[in-house]
Image (spheres, helix red, strand yellow):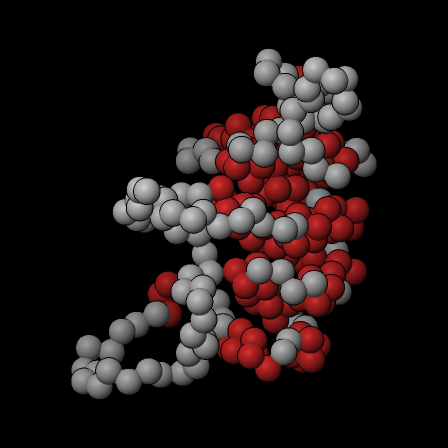
Amino acid sequence: MVCEKPSGQNGSDNAAAQPGDRPFDSTALAWLVGEGIRHLHSSDKEGELAFQRVVELLSHSRSSVKTVIELSHRVAREDVSLRWSLIHLLGEFGDESSAEFLRQTAIEQLPAEEKRQVCESPRDGEVLIRTAAVQSLVRVASRHPAVQEMFLHLVADRPVRAVLIEAVKAAIELGLRDKVAQLLPEQDKWMLEIKRVRVQEIAADPERKDSGERGFTPPKSKCSTTTPVISCCSRTEK
């Protein structure tokens, strides 16, 4: 269970991080996880090698998965960057025991949409967390084939569209296209036509004169985007 609010004065038990809490200093493994996060976004060769070394060490401990999951529950819900980093790190070394946590993270209910337009809402960050969980689950499944069937459960769970699209793409890459097609309702079958290509393979046709659509176009819906808004929108003040 993920704790969303800090403990109050009533003595209630809660695992959420408190002011001054240093979760990465609690154990040697927690410290190692912290080192992994510190080097996760390194752009130099030394940092990249340090990150790979941390991943190797974590993969040799049976308690590493449990440690990352516990840390994910302790950090503040508002700290999207740290939560994302923990989930990404888990995908680098996690085994079968991490699969259910990642699936539950991916299908967790999103907060309500903001009534006014803002540059970045809490919901946007939560979508990033859930899509990161799907991508981490992909990496776990690539090392542990037994986890692949988890994507069928994920598609059957009918998460929000952005997460469902990621789950369908991942399942297809893992060779589960036919099984996924049986789970999707007719209005979502267009997701089966999405494919991942390298940037080098994308080329525009400069001679094209018509403005007609090519290929399959997703159905129109009230939700015009399936990913978080990354450009500023004008605020509507009351």
Residue 201: x %, y % from top left: 37, 70
119 vs 163, nearest the viewer = 119
Query: Quarter of the image holding residue 184?
Result: bottom right
Residue at (63% x, 78% y) in the render: 185
193 vs 117, nearest the viewer = 117
- The image shows residue 132, relative to residue 34, as above or below, that is below
| Left or right of 19, for residue 201 | left
Residue at (46% x, 61% y) in the render: 226
Query: Quarter of the image holding residue 200?
Result: bottom left
Residue 228: x %, y % from top left: 44, 52
Q: Quadrant of the N terminus?
A: top right
Residue 50: x %, y % from top left: 55, 30
Query: Quarter of the image holding residue 4?
Result: top right
Q: Quadrant of the C terminus?
A: top left
Residue 170 visible in the snapshot: no
Total label count?
0
Residue 238 visible in the snapshot: yes
Residue at (59% x, 63% y) in the render: 164
66 vs 18, nearest the viewer = 18
Residue 137: x %, y % from top left: 66, 53
- The image shows residue 98, relative to residue 63, as above or below, that is below
Residue at (73% x, 32% y) in the render: 70
- The image shows residue 232, relative to residue 182, as above or below, that is above
Residue placed furthest toward the front: 238
7 vs 70, nearest the viewer = 7
